[in-house]
Image (spheres, rainbow, N blue to C red):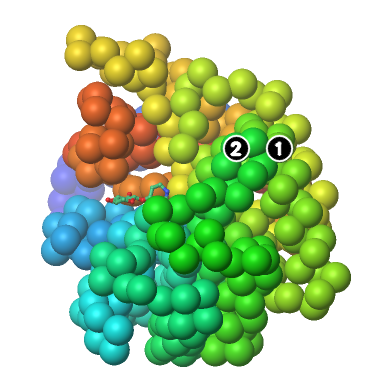
């Protein structure tokens, strides 16, 4: 190597080093972030199931599980599932002695393949009694025998795999009276609450580990209904009937009164039982208008409501927080499209499975510790 070449190489290396040093310094100089952020500004987990200290549930349908984005959203963001339709009596109980487990099994298998828990919904709901059963000329004894065998067969089949069940759904009216169902035999029960209590016992016998819930809508809004539920819970506790939790469906709206929600939740929790927000979705198109547009401002209103609900739930005693379940996964598929008869955008993910403002509102409502 001649001298001139050697000097040139040294000079080139020095120049490269200087340029690199300067680049490093100027990047640092332009970057306003300190090296480490103070603890309270550290971003927490950005995924619901990772941040939530309780179950993060979604109601699912098998028909959608073949859609990759749907299945992935459930797996990535949620820790438990509820069958939106396929574990109801009408779907499973095809005749007095015939059961169709196909779809219910698929839900439970999907959950166990992906490390998700299953909340069973629902064992006794007047709206899902199969036609053959509702119309059979049973007296109250035969009716109850059949219900017992349905409960024990179903809970027994999924023993240890379905960790919790809604044993009874929607038995009260908002004014606290017992709902008169379109099933005539109900009118002949001398003590209908006693019948529901025995349904909890039948479920418990079939799977003593399963946590058993009473589920209804407007529990936090309708104080007379809530009082009736609380009276039933006290009676069950006095009689040693195994009831572990209460679910309020939470099909509410962006306009639902916030202080009523908060007070109602606190009152529900005074039972000491587990609390499940079991079918959460938030209606935005409250006027059911054909020309409704889901604008950024509307998305923000919805996010604020989600955040408020989650914060209110978080303020309950930790040992009573069972789960929050959204009634669906994506705005692409929501039961409200059929039921509400207006275009709706009630869930946490949009039609393309993107996180909505609602998702961010939910996340912001979760406690950080
Ligand atoms: C709804 C489902 O979302 C629909 O897909 C089905 O057609 C009817 O039932 N309260 C309940 C849920 O407890 O079981 C209902 O689910 C919604 C109202």
The N terminus: image quadrant: bottom left
Q: Is residue 362 above or below residue 290?
A: below
Q: Which quarter of the figure has residue 334?
A: top left
Percent across and percent down for residue 235 are: 80, 64
**Residue 262 visible here:** yes
Q: Secondary structure at mark 1?
A: helix
Callout 2 touching callout 1 (CB < 8 Å): yes
Which is more N-terminal, label 1 or label 2? 2
Percent across and percent down for residue 219 are: 62, 42
Q: Residue at x 64, y 24 (%)?
A: 258
Q: Determine crowd level at label 2: few under 14, some 14-19, many 20+ residues with C-alpha closer than 10 A.
A: many
Q: Residue at x 47, y 76 (%)?
A: 139
Classify residue 332 as left or right of residue 113: left
Q: Determine crowd level at label 1: few under 14, some 14-19, many 20+ residues with C-alpha closer than 10 A.
A: some
Classify residue 162 as left or right of residue 331: right
Query: In the rendered image, which residue does mark 2 sit on?
Result: 174
Foreground of the two, 310 or 346:
346
Q: Is residue 215 above or below residue 190?
A: above
Q: Residue at x 81, y 75 (%)?
A: 239
Percent across and percent down for residue 91 are: 27, 69
Classify residue 98 as left or right of residue 66: right
Foreground of the two, 173 or 54:
173
- What distance separates the C-alpha of mark 2 from that of mark 1? 6 Å
Q: Which quarter of the figure has residue 80?
A: bottom left
Mark carried by residue 360? none
Query: In the rendered image, which residue does mark 1 sit on?
Result: 224
Q: Is residue 59 above or below residue 222?
A: below
Classify residue 286 as left or right of residue 233: left
Q: Residue at x 48, y 22 (%)?
A: 254
Percent across and percent down for residue 135 are: 30, 67
Foreground of the two, 89 or 55:
89
Q: Is residue 229 above or below residue 22?
A: below
């Amino acid at each position: 190597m001649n001298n001139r070449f050697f000097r040139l190489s040294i000079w080139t290396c020095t120049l490269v080093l200087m340029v690199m040093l300067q680049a490093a310094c100027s990047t640092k100089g332009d970057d306003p972030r300190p090296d480490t952020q103070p603890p309270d500004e550290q971003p927490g987990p950005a995924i619901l199931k990772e941040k939530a200290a309780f179950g993060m549930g979604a109601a699912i349908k098998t028909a959608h599980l073949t859609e990759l984005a749907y299945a992935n959203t459930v797996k990535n963001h949620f820790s438990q599932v509820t069958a939106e339709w396929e574990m109801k009596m009408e779907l499973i109980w095809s005749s007095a002695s015939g059961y169709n487990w196909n779809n219910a099994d698929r839900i439970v298998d999907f959950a166990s393949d992906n490390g998700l828990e299953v909340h069973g919904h629902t064992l006794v709901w007047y709206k899902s009694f199969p036609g053959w059963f509702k119309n059979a000329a049973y007296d109250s004894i035969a009716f109850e025998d059949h219900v017992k065998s349905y409960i024990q067969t179903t809970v027994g089949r999924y023993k240890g795999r379905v960790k919790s069940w809604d044993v009874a759904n929607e038995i009260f009216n908002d004014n606290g009276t017992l709902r008169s169902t379109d099933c005539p035999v109900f009118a002949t029960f001398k003590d209908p609450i006693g019948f529901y209590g025995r349904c909890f016992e039948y479920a418990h016998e079939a799977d003593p580990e399963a946590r058993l819930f009473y589920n209804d809508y407007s529990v936090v809004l309708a104080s007379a209904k809530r009082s009736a539920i609380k009276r039933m819970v006290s009676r069950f506790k006095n009689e040693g009937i195994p009831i572990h939790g209460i679910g309020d469906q939470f099909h509410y709206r962006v306009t639902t009164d916030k202080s009523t929600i908060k007070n109602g939740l606190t009152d529900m929790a005074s039972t000491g039982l587990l609390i499940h927000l079991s079918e959460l979705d938030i209606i935005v198109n409250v006027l059911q208008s054909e020309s409704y547009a889901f604008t950024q401002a509307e998305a923000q209103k919805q996010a604020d409501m989600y955040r408020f609900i989650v914060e209110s739930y978080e303020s309950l005693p930790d040992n009573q927080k069972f789960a929050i379940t959204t009634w669906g996964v994506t705005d692409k598929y929501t039961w409200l499209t059929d039921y509400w008869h207006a275009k709706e955008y009630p869930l946490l993910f949009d039609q393309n499975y993107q996180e909505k403002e609602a998702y961010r509102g939910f996340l912001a409502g979760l406690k950080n510790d």
